[in-house]
Image: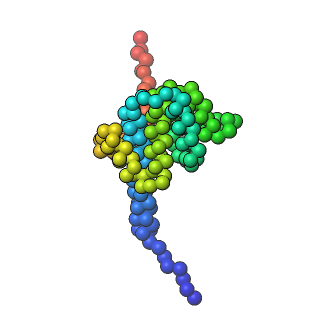
Amino acid sequence: MHHPKQTSSRDDAQWKAEQEKQRRDKAIANTTGLRVLSAIAAAVPVRLLKRDLFFVLEKLLTVLDESRIETLARQHGIRQKRDEGGIAKTLLAFMRRADEGTLSRLMVEATILLAASRHNGSSVLKDAATLYKVDTEAIGQKVKQEFAAKAKAKKEPKQEAKPITKAKKAA
């Protein structure tokens, strides 16, 4: 009769630590990528007419997958309402009201997201950052510091605030 091998809690702890490290590294990479994308969009100049930008963006949205459209919408603070018929429709409504500068930024972001989904995403983002002179190292360091501060805050036990009572003076 075979008995299953006993796994040591040390192996489990090591595996969990490795999984947590991978999750943290991925979160840092995603956050850094989004911040770099925002910095690139901020560097985009206004040149095209609104109708041209809207046309190009409308066509770009048709080739982006749902997750990329959600990312693009989130970059501009757009949240999907339940009764509106999807995030793409909500984003199109936002684009109709947006100015040329916002549409220009949306177009560059959508193009980067599309290219990243088809090719090596990090190299596409790096190429765009180089073109728009965005300091990816500084953004990456800032994101790592923010994540480290959050991790430190989680590890430190919260100090409970003790109620301060005022003693009444005897008259």
> Quarter holding the N terminus?
bottom right
Would residue 103 be seen by someone viewing this image from the given angle?
yes
Residue at 57% across, 26% down: 97
Compared with 105, 6 (above or below) is below
Compared with 115, 94 (above or below) is above
Residue at 55% across, 86% down: 2
Residue 81 lies left or right of residue 95; in this view the side is: right
How is the rendered protein coloured? rainbow
Q: Nearer the viewer, residue 151 or 127?
A: 127
How many numbered marks appear? 0
Rendered location of residue 11, percent (x, y): 42, 69
Identify the residue at the far right of this view.
83
Q: Nearer the viewer, residue 31 or 73?
A: 73
Rendered location of residue 138, percent (x, y): 30, 41
Identify the residue at the far bottom of this view.
1
Would residue 159 be seen by someone viewing this image from the given angle?
no
Residue at 45% across, 34% down: 105
> Quarter holding the C terminus?
top left
Compared with 69, 104 (above or below) is above
> Which image quadrant is residue 55 in?
top right
Rendered location of residue 149, percent (x, y): 36, 42
Rendered location of residue 40, percent (x, y): 38, 38
